Image: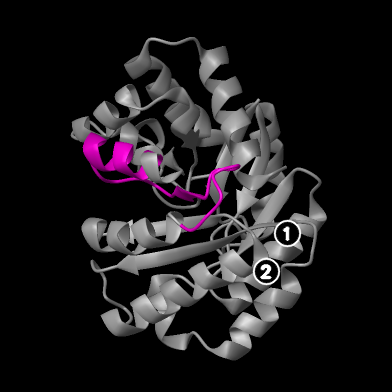
Amino acid sequence: MLFDTHAHLHDPWIGDDLPDVMNRAAESGVGRIVTIGCSLEDSRNALKVAEQYENVWATLGVHPHDAKDWTTEIESEFRTMAKHGKVVAIGEIGLDFYRNLSPHDDQYRAFEAQLALADDLNLPVVIHSRDAHEESYGVLLEWANRRTREFPVGVIHCFSGDADLAHRYHTLGFLISFAGPVTYPKNDALREAAATLPLEAIVIETDCPYLSPQPRRGKRNEPANVQYTAEQIVEVRWESTTTIADLSTANALRLFRI
């Protein structure tokens, strides 16, 4: 069984099609899914979906795009929501210097506040980093060194760096999540990272309904398509499908303490 560690099942693009999406996921061997919060309202919606399905869990977070909206009131509500048994992480949080939809100062402010919240709640984090590789790593280097290593401290979602950065993150206690882009023809650096990391460092995701893998490119993504990412990892590592499915799922269970 596969574990889609990062989806947006509550996205309007999926909407009323969610029951069919979940059925196709089950038919494709996807046994567990985490749906990701990106704002206060989005986190509420993620938790509502997690409550509907036994095999779905949720995260709480304010995405760097919405970092300008971060307030202590949102933090207070997250603290209350985190008491729910279906909440497994703080995220999606981080830095995005590609779109710059929030000023950099606000992105750092919200990022560091939510890392502190994860500390207080003893939850792992789900990290978004785009065009901010070294800046994100610098923030997380200090933070991760304060965390216990009994569990992974978090996951680098939809990893887009090179093998060196992937190994540096793993040394800090992070798992590395590969999504549809690892299947794109020009992404040799991602495939090198997937090929050289220890197996205990790897999880897989769709980021649905976005970033469909190469065989489904141009169409709406959904958890059933995580199989294509798994197949790419199988190909670059010369491992069996069973090995990749079993170990990536075991890694996700450790990460989210399920």
Residue numbers of the magenta segment: 146-170
- Look at the numbered disc 2 and give the secondary structure of its residue: helix
Question: Quick check: 35 above or below 256?
Answer: below
The type of residue carrying mark 1 is Val
Question: Quick check: 225 above or below 119?
Answer: above
- In front of the other: 152 or 224: 152
The residue under the point 43% across, 49% down is 157
Q: Position of residue 119 (x, y in %)?
A: 58, 65
Give me the C-alpha separation between circle 2 and circle 1. 6 Å
Label 2: few (<14), some (14–19) or many (≥20) C-alpha neighbours in 10 Å: many
- Give the left or right position of residue 33, taking residue 6 as reference: right
The residue under the point 57% across, 40% down is 4
User: Which residue lies under the disc numbered 1?
Assistant: 49
Q: Are marks 2 and 1 in contact (CB under 8 Å)?
A: yes
The type of residue carrying mark 2 is Asn
Label 1: few (<14), some (14–19) or many (≥20) C-alpha neighbours in 10 Å: many
* Residue 168, numbered circle: none
- Look at the numbered disc 1 and give the secondary structure of its residue: helix
- In front of the other: 159 or 21: 159
Is 125 covered by the magenta stretch?
A: no
Q: Position of residue 221 (x, y in %)?
A: 48, 45
- Give the left or right position of residue 1, taking residue 208 as reference: right
